[in-house]
Amino acid sequence: MFDMSLGEDLSLIQDQVRHFSTRVLHERHREFEERHEVPESVVAEFAALGLAGLELPETLGGAGLGALAKVLVLEELGAGDPGAALALDGLGAALYPLAELGGPAAIETYAVPLLDKPAARALLVWGDSERPGGNRKPLCGAHTCDGTIPWVPAQHADRVVVLDREGAAVLDSGFRFTPLKGSGLRAAGAAQLDFIDAPIRERWQDREGAARALARWQLHTAALMVGLMRTAAETSREYAMQRVAFGKPIAHHQALAFLIADMRSAVDATRILVQEAAWRADRGLPFTGAAATAFVEAVEASMFVTPNALQIFGGQGFMQDLPLEKYMREARTLGLLAGGVDLARDIAGTEVTTSSDGFALSPILAEES
Amino acid sequence: MDFSIDAATAHRLAAFDRLGREQMRPLGLEADRLGRPTPPDHPYFQTLIGMGFGRTRWRPSRGERSRGEESSDKVGNSRATLLLSEQLSYWDRGVAVSAPGPGLGEGAIISMGTEDQKQRYLTPFINPDKPRWGAFAMTEPAAGSDVAGIQTRAIRDGNDWVLIGNKSFSGNSSRADFILVWATVDPSLGRAGHRAFLVEHGMPGLQDFHIERKMGLKAYESTSFRLEECRVPGANLLGGEAHYEKRAGFKGAMDTFNSTRPMVAAMAVGIGRSALDEAIAFARAEGMTDDPRIRDRLERAARKLRAARLLSLKAAWLADHRQPNIVEASMSKALAPTAAFEAASLGMELLGLAGARGDHLIEKLFRDVKAMDIVEGTGQIQRVVMARKLVDLPQS
Ligand SMILES: Cc1cc2nc3c(=O)[nH]c(=O)nc-3n(C[C@H](O)[C@H](O)[C@H](O)COP(=O)(O)OP(=O)(O)OC[C@H]3O[C@@H](n4cnc5c(N)ncnc54)[C@H](O)[C@@H]3O)c2cc1C
């Protein structure tokens, strides 16, 4: 029956990550942003938490924990610094196509070796440059990939996985990073990524597997957004109780009191959609619609919460001495990842309009017994 | 974490679907067409009693456990109740509220009432011989959200109390065996002056019942009435004198957790799902679902309902574990009615002019749903409540 308790193991992991994230990531997020990277000492400290293999099966040396554990961890990291979260989690979302399309063999070949190298990174990119109304141009053919990704939150990668609607391809060479300033998430690096006749090492064709991999990526990104929004909402809530205007704390002017209540609701609503979708994935239930839904909500909610958090700080919010402007930029850039929000709307909307059972919009399923 | 429903609840939900499809929805449409509440002698209510509805959750205490005290380690199951209410509202929220039972006052009677009061007023609902109703009357012409401002006076007269005032919109009250009436011994005291009375049908001075004509939810009566020097025995003061000496009014009970708001949120979700299902069915039949403009809006409505539902369950889960849930309860109550309204309004847009004919279920749901943002604390009041917790918003 519906139950929100995390249990001991997950609570412990959550506490650990929260501690690290508040103490290290949030403290130093401006420094990471400026350097366009996270220093090695921080990478090492994160590695010591032992979270790199969180989702890997136990047979491959992982912790065998699922998507729910992962979104809890990502929320905490996102609350500290989502850019750093991308930099620290070397395998990141690239794991998902490997696992969903290639299975254990692909994980063993392409993922596990990277775990042993502390600063190694695998990068996942969306290879379907379809835009609403535009022409569809996949990045990869059968043997090579050609084209440009205008921005990736990375400066280097040992391995690139290209995901599109049809499947996924793994590449180890033939791509080039050209550093950029970037708009947000600079702690993870920022570059244009060009593929020039890049040879595909392995390619899988499987639309359903690709859909699941994308859904996991959407959840990954949405969880970071939940953390980021949480920090933005909390920071502005606390400030609004201190700052006085017209004779009382600004939080006690009802326009702001209600806004703050609505910001909190937006964070909580997104979080529970993310967690429910992750739970579905862990249970082996269909989860692509739920994940796309959570992602759309995350994007919309973060574009409500982070600009309003800045607004509550007034002019100061616009200044780079405070982190509010950074929260807003990063929320915006996160929402451009994982194929973007319109793709997610397509997926979620198609599920809503085609499911045969009225009750299927139910996020809740009866226990199969 | 677990987002599933247990098998027993799923089973009950399925049983409700049959009742809903075969009886509730037709009755709701009928009441809407005729513009009157389902009469109390309608066979439907007898059917409900036969099915086990209309009962109190209270049981006479055997042994020494004193009143108001429930075993604190027992995990409640308001989650199941919430899902069942949602499903009843899916079929027809007006018909759901018309169901017999002790009504909104039940919780207050259980938590504040004396053993004698529970015996007298709840025992008939343990195994009711016929459909019976209880009602709750707080709102007045001049005070709704600002509960502290109620004007109905309670004046002590020997062993009795005399009640003078007007009450508004009280659900099922003209057919109720008793109405839990809130009054004040001194309006200048605010909530501290509040007293609740069990006023029985037929007590002299309980009069002038006026069944309001509503925009929607017509299947149950929302009734205004007058207390014209209504004399109530001292034994009908809820909780007895001692209760009010110990506690300043009834605020204490509301302070840490709340289970009605998530429940009302769930009802709104039920109406919203109903509207969305109809809208999707219509859009499909008309071949509209390939249009991204339409699909996006359906997606959004589904998403908002989904979040509201999960948040209402979360608030109920907290209440079941006796954890503070004021923010979560109000959050779900703030979000669900607007999500449901959006679904119904979208349904009207998809119907186009066919929605304006006034004979489509979606059009009825569109009228029904608006009340959900008003009852049990308006959307604004939910935000006030949240802000008290989040930013120490002063009481006034
Ligand atoms: C269908 C229906 C059934 C009902 N059933 C019952 C029942 O069984 N028993 C019962 O006692 N009552 C019942 N009510 C009454 C209901 O509880 C009240 O209507 C509700 O509490 C609002 O009070 P009000 O109507 O006096 O509006 P007001 O309190 O006058 O509010 C008017 C507007 O001002 C806003 N407002 C008020 N205070 C604030 C504030 N501090 N900040 C910002 N905005 C504010 C409100 O949100 C609202 O929009 C029912 C109402 C309806 C519609």
Image: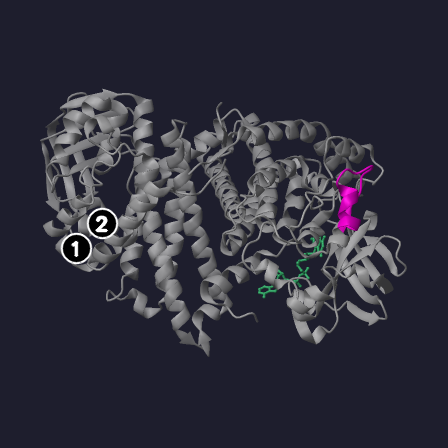
Q: Which numbered tag is attached to residue A32? A: 1
- In this image, B321 relative to B1: left or right? right
Circles 2 and 1, Cβ within 8 Å, touching? The answer is: yes
In the depicted view, which residue is nearer to us: A62 or A186?
A: A62
Q: Chain of mark 1?
A: A
The amino acid marked with disc number 1 is Phe
Residue range highlighted in magenta: B119-135
Residue A222 falls in which quadrant of the image? top left
Q: Position of residue B336 (x, y in %)?
A: 55, 47
Inspect the magenta stretch and tell me whether residue B134 lies in it. yes
Q: Chain of mark 2?
A: A
Image quadrant containing the C terminus of chain B: bottom right
Q: Residue tagged by mark 2?
A: A83
Q: Is residue A202 visible?
A: yes
Inspect the magenta stretch and tell me whether residue B349 lies in it. no
The number of numbered discs placed on residues in the rendered structure image is 2
